Image (tube, helix red, strand yellow):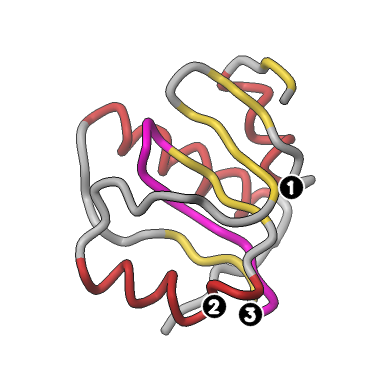
Amino acid sequence: MKLKNQDQASEAIQNREAFLASALWAIDGRSNTYGMLNPEEIEQYEAVRDSIDFVVMSYKTPIAWHSSAGWYMVKQKFSVTTSRHQGIVRRALNSKGLVEVSR
């Protein structure tokens, strides 16, 4: 996993490359934890679980993932730091015209 700063994380997200940028990080494949996800977000995760190929995490919570259905960003609100991480993901996807999945 490549060490990145949070500015570099945006490009890594766009390219779906695993990285570590302090409490913001991403992995290839699925996460082994739901962290602080609420039941509705867990349901969204489980709906595409078998086709997830990339997950962006804030601390131990998945905040966005890519699957065969496209990108999904968690709508749930968390801490100030995690909200900042969600903003990084949102900007990364929007700047490249990557479409967020809505369900």
Q: Distance of mark 1 from mark 2, alpha carbons?
A: 17 Å
Magenta-span inclusion, residue 38: no
Circle 1 Cα neighbour tier, 10 Å, few/some/many (<14 / 14–19 / ≥20): some
**In which quarter of the view is residue 25 placed?**
top right
**Please, what secondary structure does the residue beneath circle 3 have?**
loop
- Label 1 belongs to which residue? 16
Magenta stretch: give its range.
58-68
Above/below status of 51 relative to 12: below
Is 15 or 43 nearer to us in this picture?
43
Quadrant of the snapshot with the N terminus: top right
The residue type indicated by label 1 comes to Arg
Is 10 or 54 nearer to us in this picture?
54
- Label 2 belongs to which residue? 48
Q: Are marks 1 and 2 in contact (CB under 8 Å)?
A: no
Residue at 45% x, 60% y is 73
* Percent of width and height locating residue 24: 48, 29
Circle 2 Cα neighbour tier, 10 Å, few/some/many (<14 / 14–19 / ≥20): some
Q: Are marks 3 and 1 in contact (CB under 8 Å)?
A: no
Instruction: Please tell me the numbered disc located at residue 69.
Output: 3
The residue type indicated by label 3 comes to Ala
Q: Are marks 3 and 2 in contact (CB under 8 Å)?
A: yes
Q: Main secondary structure of the magenta part?
A: strand
Q: Distance of mark 3 from mark 2, alpha carbons?
A: 7 Å
